[in-house]
Amino acid sequence: MPEISKISSVAIGSIGKIFGIAKSSMGKFMGISAPAAYSNTYSIDLDGTNDYMTADGIFDDISVSVGTISMWIKLEPTGYNGVLIKADVDKSNQLGMAYLNSTTKMRFQYKAGGTNKTIDHSVSIEADGNWHHVVVTWDTSADQLKGYIDGSQVGSTVTGLGTWSGTINAFRVGANSIADNSYVNGHIDQVAIFTSVVSASALYNSGTPYDLSSISNLVGYWEMNEGTGTSIADSSGTGNTGTLVNGAAFASDVA
């Protein structure tokens, strides 16, 4: 008998039909974390000048106590820092990831009550022509911040997280949500937000993106597959539709 984690997505879908459950929900129903088959058709292409994506509905769904953000990025040449994703209340309470052009480092950040904790890791990913998977996790009960690139933890686990104050009121993918700057020049794909710590190696899936919709505690999941228009569906089931701003567009270059 095959291990339950190795049951194919086709088999999962067939079982789902028997019980009247959608394939995307069968992983949660059966406790299976195996990748589901899907088609990754588009990414979003940001010009580094003023493009970004937002999803105002996500404000109340992000947990500042524990969570995971996962995304795929392909950076073009840039002369400035680029915020890959950020959610915040104000300058003293924010979390997310950024590429620091000035030092060629990836930054993973959790700042709460003015206590700023970061993991900075040197990278050579700018204009290398490749897609990279980046993940940040935070857990205030364990007092830990961690960052991952392409499935591996980078830097050291950071402890001593501060106490968050206020409610998230701003969120952006590809730009700073606090100030009008730090726009990303490049492609972003498969952005997912969870209210739990999810294994980065599982999300990375040995370098092959897959459907994350069956993973528990998913509150935002933008696959970027629309191809046209300015709206991006939220495949998490929470209905937090994304919006492309200032001419951000879809591209067929995908992770």
Image (cartoon, grey):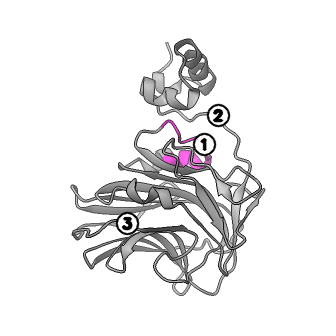
Q: Quadrant of residue 217?
A: top left
Task: Using the image as rendered, state which of residue 238 and residue 149 is in the foreground.
Answer: 238
Give the extent of the magenta segment: 203-214
Taking the magenta stretch, the answer to whether it contains residue 205 is: yes
**Numbered circle sitting on residue 210:** 1
Task: Using the image as rendered, state which of residue 150 and residue 231 is in the foreground.
Answer: 231
Under circle 1, the secondary element is loop
Q: Specify whether 234 is left or right of 148.
A: right
Q: Position of residue 168 (x, y in %)?
A: 37, 66
Circle nearer the N terminus (1, 3) = 3
Q: Specify whether 243 is left or right of 240.
A: right
Determine whether label 1 and label 3 are within 8 Å by CB. no
**For discs 2 and 3, the disc positioned in front in the rendered view:** 3
Number of marks: 3
- Residue that numbered label 3 is attached to: 168
- Residue type at the position of mark 1: Tyr
Q: Residue at x 56, y 32 (%)?
A: 24
- Distance (Cα) linking label 2 and label 3: 34 Å
